[in-house]
Each structure stands twice: as structure tokens, then as C-alpha cells.
Image (spheres, rainbow, N blue to C red):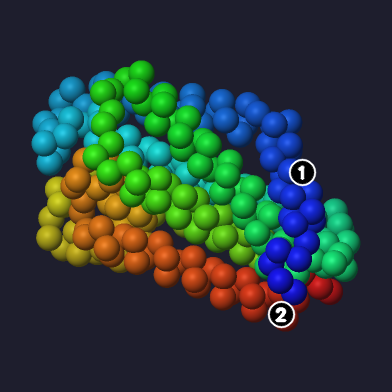
């Protein structure tokens, strides 16, 4: 089925997911802003005043891309997983599977909504950061590109988690035990060039390093890895997620009894 064969179906799911976020506005938008503000107070104020510039950039400005990525990664996975998990939990997934919609259309609707929410939250956090630091963006186009690509990539990953999870415990285990540690160890609050050679080499196996580095490069023109590697990783991750989702829908993995 052509992706555009059922635009009304895509719009209906997308609109429902966006309206669900409006019903939980505090959790979806206000809470990340408050959390980010606290990070600026603690890291930007208390610690930043004791840290010299990194790559010619003040510490408060340096952590902005990392904080945005930290929020985008967690929110994308959360929104992407919950969007598909609740239909499974309530049993309405069978209505979706029997509806005149292809798998590509369903994924487009759910992932599109999750990515949209993540992009909005990322922009709000960047706007919030201007209250604390003098933010500049050296490459606006690439900043927007990394923002959208990362939101889409991890919304797809969250969708995978939602399909895989059998209960709420499994739904939360990936963000809690995998994503959060990788993000904090991925250069959110520091440059991996500050690490000893051995640990810097180990950090290069952390995929989040590439995303944060590419996003930080779009702001300040500096990064821990080449920007081409960051862009390539984002595109490769999207391709892997799409391939896995295609297999899940084809086989009915944890979608059908």
C-alpha cells in the first residue's frame, strides 16, 4: 500500500497522539523545562564558575546541546514507546492491525507525533537556556537537521521498545538502565577529550557520543568526533530501526497472539 494511500488515517492517529500530550501538558512540557533549569543552576552556576572554557566556549553554553540531547533522547523513547504500548495494553491494537492502514502509515503517524513533541520540547529548552547563557548557533541548518534526525531516530527506537515490551516494567527498563547511563557518559556535561586516552577510546563505542558531538558542533563548530560520523550514525540508526520494524510487522512479533 502506498504511504499516502490513507492520509486521513495517518492524520487521525497523529492528531490523537498530539491531543494526548496536551492533556498531560505538565508532564510533557513543563517538567522538562523545570529539570533543565535546575541543571543550569547546579552545573552552569555552581560548577560552571569553577570550570575553565572548553574549546573556547564557556561551560554554561557548552552544556546546552548536551542538555537538549539528554531531554530529546529520553522524551523521544518515552513518547514513541507509550504511543504503541497502550493500544497493546488495552487491546485496541487489533483494531489498528485490521484497519485499512499499512504498517508504514501506522509507524509514520505514531513516530511522527512522538518526534514532533520531542522537537518542540528541544526548542523550548533552547529558548529556556537563553535565560541563563548567551546562546549562539554557528550552523542553524545542521542544528535543525540533527534535532529532527535524533528525534525521529529515537522515536523509532521507542516504538520498537513499545512493541517489544510485555509490561510496564519492560517499558521502562531500556530508558532507565540503558539510555540514561549512555547519555550521561556520552559527553553531556563534558568533552570526551578531557578523559584519559583509554577512557576516551572506550567512549567512542558509546553511540550517544556521536549525536551529542554533532549537535554541539552545529552550535559552536567544535565536536569530539567528525560531524560526518555523527550524521552517518543518525542515518544508520534510523535505517536499522526501520528494518527491524518492517520485520516486526511482517512477522507479527508481539503484535499478534
Look at 74% across and 74% down and name the residue there.
1
Residue drawn at the location 61% of the way across and 48% of the way down = 114
Seen at 20% across and 64% down, the residue is 201
* Left or right placement of residue 148 versus residue 143 in this view: right
Seen in the picture, residue 180 relative to 97 is either above or below; the reply is: above
Residue 15 figure quarter? top right
- Label 2: element kind: helix
Binning the other alpha carbons within 10 Å of mark 2 as few (below 14), some (14 to 19) or many (20 upward) gives few
> Which residue appears at 46% of the width and 34% of the height?
123
Give residue 131's quadrant in the image: top left
How far across and down, in percent of the image, does residue 62 sit?
24, 36
User: Residue 161: which disc?
Assistant: none
Residue 250: which disc?
Answer: 2
Q: Disc 1 versus disc 2: distance between alpha carbons?
A: 25 Å
Q: Quadrant of the C terminus?
A: bottom right
Q: Which residue is situated farthest in the top direction here?
A: 131
Residue placed most toward the observer, 126 or 45: 126
Left or right of residue 217: residue 239 = right
Can you see residue 174? no
Q: Residues within 10 Å of mark 1 (few under 14, many from 20)?
A: some
At which x and y percent is residue 187? 28, 48
Q: Secondary structure at mark 1?
A: helix
Residue 144 in the image: above or below residue 232? above
Tell me, yes or no, if residue 215 can be seen here: yes
Residue topped by disc 1 = 16
**Of labels 1 and 2, the one closer to you:** 1
State left or right for residue 128 relative to residue 110.
Answer: left
Tell which of 5 and 218 is nearer to you. Answer: 5
- Label 1 close to label 2 by CB (< 8 Å): no
Sequence-wise, the earlier of marks 1 and 2 is: 1
Q: Could you tell me residue 195's position as x and y percent?
A: 16, 52
Amino acid at each position: 500500500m502506498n504511504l499516502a494511500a490513507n492520509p486521513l488515517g495517518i492524520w487521525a492517529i497523529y492528531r490523537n497522539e498530539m491531543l494526548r500530550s496536551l492533556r498531560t501538558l505538565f508532564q510533557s512540557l513543563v517538567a522538562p523545562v523545570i529539570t533543565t533549569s535546575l541543571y543550569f543552576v547546579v552545573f552552569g552556576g555552581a560548577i560552571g564558575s569553577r570550570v575553565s572554557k572548553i574549546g573556547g566556549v564557556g561551560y554554561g553554553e557548552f552544556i546546552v546541546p548536551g542538555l537538549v540531547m539528554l531531554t530529546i533522547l529520553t522524551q523521544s523513547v518515552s513518547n514513541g514507546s507509550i504511543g504503541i504500548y497502550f493500544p497493546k495494553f488495552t487491546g485496541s491494537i487489533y483494531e489498528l492491525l485490521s484497519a485499512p492502514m499499512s504498517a508504514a502509515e501506522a509507524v509514520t503517524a505514531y513516530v511522527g507525533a512522538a518526534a514532533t513533541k520531542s522537537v518542540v520540547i528541544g526548542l523550548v529548552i533552547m529558548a529556556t537556556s537563553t535565560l541563563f547563557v548567551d546562546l549562539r548557533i554557528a550552523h542553524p541548518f545542521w542544528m535543525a537537521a540533527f534535532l529532527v534526525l535524533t528525534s525521529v531516530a529515537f522515536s523509532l527506537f521507542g516504538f520498537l521498545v513499545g512493541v517489544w515490551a510485555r509490561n510496564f516494567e519492560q517499558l521502562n527498563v531500556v530508558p532507565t538502565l540503558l539510555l540514561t547511563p549512555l547519555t550521561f557518559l556520552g559527553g553531556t556535561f563534558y568533552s570526551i577529550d578531557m578523559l584519559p586516552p583509554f577512557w576516551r577510546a572506550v567512549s567512542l563505542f558509546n553511540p550517544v557520543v556521536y549525536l551529542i558531538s554533532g549537535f554541539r558542533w552545529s552550535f559552536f563548530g567544535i565536536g569530539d568526533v567528525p560531524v560526518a560520523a555523527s550524521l552517518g550514525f543518525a542515518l544508520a540508526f534510523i535505517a536499522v530501526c526501520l528494518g527491524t520494524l518492517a520485520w516486526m510487522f511482517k512477522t507479527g512479533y508481539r503484535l499478534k497472539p
